[in-house]
Image (cartoon, rainbow, N blue to C red):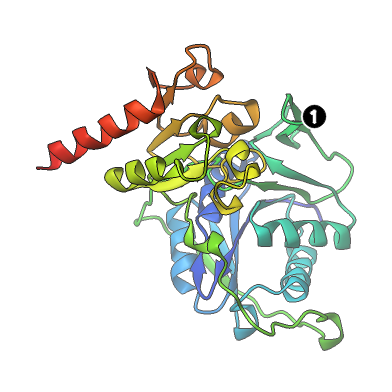
Amino acid sequence: MESKNLWVYIETDEGRAKNVGFELLNPGRRMADKLGEKLVAVVLGKGIAEAAKTAIACGADQVITVDSEDFATYNSDIHTCAMVQLIEKYRPAIVLYGATNNGRDVGPRVACALKTGLTADCTGLDIDENGLLASTRPAFGGNLMATISCPNTKPQMSTVRPGVFKKPVLDEGRTGEIITEMVNIPAAQVRVHLLERVREVAEAVDLEGAEVIVSGGRGLKSAENFALVRDLAKAMGGVVGASRAAVDAGWIPHAHQVGQTGKTVAPKIYVAVGISGAIQHLAGMSGSDTIIAINKDPDAPIFSVADYGIVGDAFEVVPALIAAMEAHKK
């Protein structure tokens, strides 16, 4: 049986789909059209009818669903077993996952079980002249971009960070086929069992879903000075982000980190306060619609990607911006 069609894994949690799956339907649609094949969304979870409908509205031709209490929350063994069974039955040529904590877990496990390759943390996807998936990702500490293909085994697989691609505009008039599947999960293969679920601070910091992000960097000089960033974020109705330097200094938790080793984001507005703009940080936010940089160094790399740049002391500029916004509201 020949491998065909392009699959996108739609991650869910308690019935709610993560945005990254829908984002991947954007390049997925383009590449499926290029191959002349179908774009298929795969949704595992409990109470996932709405997620399946949204996948079709985002461009999927088909949706394969497994709706069961077993999939209400993520389980490494159960989700891996299910994906392996589905892939062995339908034989897709390409499978894409979001590079979330769960996607980074299930993707490599499935690849290992199927004895195929996987390219992790991609920032670009395309189909090359040989009809193969060409996955682009940072390499050597983010100092160059490598394009990787997997010509000898199928399916070709990649994980992609949230925020790299834009979620497609919903077309509520689109129609598609929803296929309901049942999978058999042998009890002997389930070695991981949920004892207690703890909500981490990362779940409360929705950087990927934010429309406005205000991030602080080394230029703030201390954890106390992050109050400036928080005040500006509050005034703009946004959330707080940070550079790796600020996180490494212990000024703010890792859940706020934007960049190659943090979150990849693409908000409508991204404000960088006291961030020089190392390539690792730029890789995580350069897809933002509008970038505003505040830095006292006129040669800071951040200005190379900024739509608007303010050369000045953040301790003077930020309070002035907040005061102007408060005055405008009145």
Q: 282 or 48: nearer the eye?
A: 282
Residue at 40% across / 28% down in the picture? 314
Residue at 55% across / 24% down in the picture? 276
Residue named by callout 1: 140
In this rendering, is residue 169 above or below 219? below
Pick the quarter of the image with the C terminus.
top left
Mark 1 closeness class: few <14, some 14–19, many ≥20 residues within 10 Å: few
Q: Is residue 252 left or right of residue 291?
A: right
Where is residue 180? Give x, y as percent. Answer: 59, 75
Query: Based on the displayed image, in which of its 4 quarters is residue 50 positioned?
Result: bottom left
Question: Which residue sits furthest top?
Answer: 299
Q: 257 or 285: nearer the eye?
A: 257
Q: Is residue 70 left or right of residue 168?
A: right
Decide if residue 74 is in sight here: yes
In this rendering, is residue 219 above or below 22? above
Residue at 83% across / 40% down in the picture? 150
Question: Which residue sits furthest left?
Answer: 330
- For the residue marked with disc 1, what is the amino acid? Phe
In this rendering, is residue 81 above or below 204? below
Decide if residue 259 is in sight here: no
Where is residue 13? Give x, y as percent. Answer: 55, 71
Q: Is residue 12 left or right of residue 1?
A: left
In this rendering, is residue 85 above or below 151? below
Q: Is residue 187 left or right of residue 323?
A: right
Where is residue 190? Give x, y as percent. Answer: 81, 81
Local secondary structure at mark 1: loop
Query: Based on the displayed image, in which of its 4 quarters is residue 259 positioned?
Result: top right
Residue at 48% across / 18% down in the picture? 303
Where is residue 230? Give x, y as percent. Answer: 39, 46
Pick the quarter of the image with the N terminus.
bottom right
